[in-house]
Image (cartoon, grey):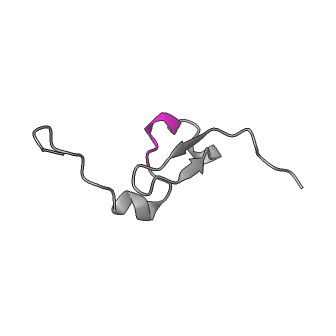
Amino acid sequence: MHRKPHLPEKPCQCCERPFAWRKKWAQVWEEVKYCSERCRRQRKPPPSPGAQP
């Protein structure tokens, strides 16, 4: 069976799980932030600059 162990990965900004490169993302890999449509819809709002931690 053919495995794909050498594909780049990055963490999802919503669920923080790692996801691998896909051919359909070849041209926009740097812009891909979410592992799935579900995570994209549930994305966390960016922290406001003046917010206290």
Query: What residue sits 62% from the left and 47% below the top?
Result: 22
Query: What residue sits 34% from the left and 63% below the top?
Result: 42
In the picture, measured across the screen, residue 4 lies left or right of residue 40, that is right
In the picture, measured across the screen, residue 35 lies left or right of residue 3, that is left
Q: How many marks?
A: 0
Residue 34 percent location from the top left of the image: 45, 51
Front-most of residues 38 and 17: 17
Query: What residue sits 57% from the left and 50% below the top?
Result: 19
Q: Is residue 15 shown above or below 46?
A: below
In the picture, measured across the screen, residue 17 lies left or right of residue 33, that is right
Residue interval drawn in magenta: 29-33
Q: Is residue 30 magenta?
A: yes
Residue 8 percent location from the top left of the image: 63, 38
Quadrant where the image shows the N terminus: bottom right
Q: Is residue 53 magenta?
A: no
Residue furthest to the right in view is 1
Quadrant where the image shows the C terminus: top left
Front-most of residues 17 and 21: 17
Residue furthest to the left in view is 50
Residue 21 percent location from the top left of the image: 61, 44
Q: Quadrant of residue 33?
A: top left
Query: What residue sits 77% from the left and 46% below the top?
Result: 4
Front-most of residues 46 and 51: 51
In the picture, measured across the screen, residue 31 lies left or right of residue 21, that is left
Q: Main secondary structure of the magenta part?
A: helix
